[in-house]
Image (cartoon, helix red, strand yellow):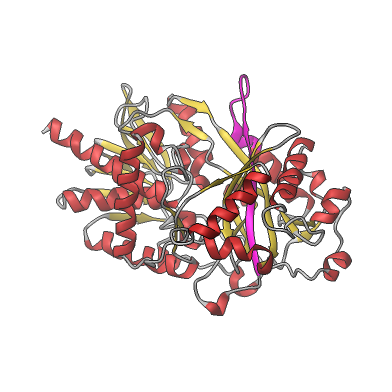
Amino acid sequence: MEKQVDVIIIGAGPGGIFCAYELMHCRPELRVAIFEKGRSIEKRECPKRKTKQCVGCKPCSITTGFAGAGAFSDGKLSLSPDVGGNLPEILGYDETVKLIGESDAIYLQFGADTNIYGMDREAEVREIRRKAINANLKLVECPIRHLGTEEGYKIYCRLQKHLEEQGVELHFGTMVTDIIVEDGTATGVKTESGEVWHAKEIVSAVGREGAGWFRGKCEEIGIETTPGTVDVGVRVEVRDEIMQTLNENLYEAKLIYHTPTFDDKVRTFCTNPSGEVATEYYEGGLAVVNGHAYKSAEYKTNNTNFAILVSKNFTRPFKTPIAYGRKIAELSNMLCGGKILVQTFGDFRRGRRTTEERLCRNNLIPTLKDAVPGDLSLVFPHRIMVDIEEMLLALDKVTPGIASEETLLYGVEVKFYSNKVIVNRDFETSIRGLRAIGDGAGVTRGLQQASANGLSVARSILQSMEQQA
């Protein structure tokens, strides 16, 4: 049986959610269908939170389902256009500022905390910037609105309920297997169950977990892409005391470094004060490391975690950076039985494996309980190892103690947003009728710009509909 709607959205992450929200807000009579291979938000439960062991749920509730990986992330909304994606390059800086403000207002409407970090500590931030400059680090100032893992979940629950009440058709547990193209125009999608749905407008809003799938669709139906950047690195864990100044004044200090040995770009990402290191599982059971933090004091720890990511750009003939990142993560998984590898910075510098015995001596207690002590030098290329070490030594000049021998490094952290689709200002791909947004298209790199991207593409769709009427 074939069915017809006005707009099909593939993926129920922030981009897809905000696209549907805006479409229904402006045109309540539209038929909008979202197809999501994961579960509805109230059914997204990770057994590991109780058992402390992954049981291999398929699909993984941490990375798939309504709100995507954002549902269980730390829930940080970066309110600067300079952080979180390429929207300024596509839409212009002023338009991106406007869209971020509008998407932020929607989060506030659905219950986000009104507090913004990094706005009222001018003297303290100046001192942090001075230390960063002395260490050849660039501090990117970015106001942060922190949802918190548990509060972010509640906000997305309200958004799901709102979309349902507005008449959006939410199809959970529904994997899109094919994008139907006729004479160079996308006309519909086919699901795993064999159902065919048609629409004049199709939006691919898959996130990082779906980036590999969308890359395959690009090759299959001829969507123009360009090799993007892949970010590979580690998640660092230290005591809260070490990060206290940065945490209290910025919440998330975004620092960029160009390493002296290779001149590679390395950056900090996704800081979680008093948080936990976590495992994410992607397609094929691939385990990668991440982190989150709760708002409630009940769930807070004594540790702060953040990522150090090395950005790698590739030139011809190489054109599959997502596969490169996966191979590094797969190697780590192979060495530690599908889990996350952990090593002290002292052992990392000495090139020796961390053992259970040495880990138990640490003042620093790992928050990822099933991480396997090991040796990251067996996983990373030498160049990335050097980049990580040089970044930590530079950070130590800003907040002493980060380069302590006891500092924990978890691997591998990979960001799968490197399938960079070529789109125009309206996010149209080279296939007519198909638009691509969000992290899975290489357009954004985080919750806020993905949400803003959803608003933007919805308005482009509405404008196109008006012109055709």
Q: What residue is at 38 percent from the left and 63 percent from the top?
A: 156
Task: State the image quarter where residue 460 is shown.
Answer: top left
In this view, the residue farthest toward the left is 469
356 sits to left or right of 218: right
Q: What residue is at 62 percent from the left and 66 percent from the top?
A: 244
Image: 75 above or below 35: below
Q: What residue is at 50 percent from the left and 68 percent from the top?
A: 45
| Residue 443 in view of the camera | yes
Q: Quadrant where the C terminus lies?
A: top left
- In the rendered image, residue 303, in percent from the top left (x then y), is placed at 66, 68
Choose between 353 and 113: the one closer to the eye. Answer: 113
Task: State the image quarter where residue 43 is shown.
Answer: bottom left
Choose between 357 and 37: the one closer to the eye. Answer: 357
- In the rendered image, residue 201, in percent from the top left (x then y), is placed at 27, 37
In this view, the residue farthest toward the bottom is 298
Residue 314 belongs to magenta span: yes
Q: Quadrant where the N terminus lies?
A: top left
Choose between 412 and 362: the one closer to the eye. Answer: 362
Choose between 30 and 301: the one closer to the eye. Answer: 301
| Residue 12 in view of the camera | no
**Callout count:** 0
179 sits to left or right of 140: left
- In the rendered image, residue 66, in percent from the top left (x then y), is placed at 41, 58
Image: 454 above or below 409: above
In this view, the residue farthest toward the top is 316
| Magenta range | 303-324
- In the rendered image, residue 24, in percent from the top left (x then y), is placed at 21, 52
Residue 243 belongs to magenta span: no
Q: What residue is at 26 percent from the left and 55 percent from the top?
A: 168
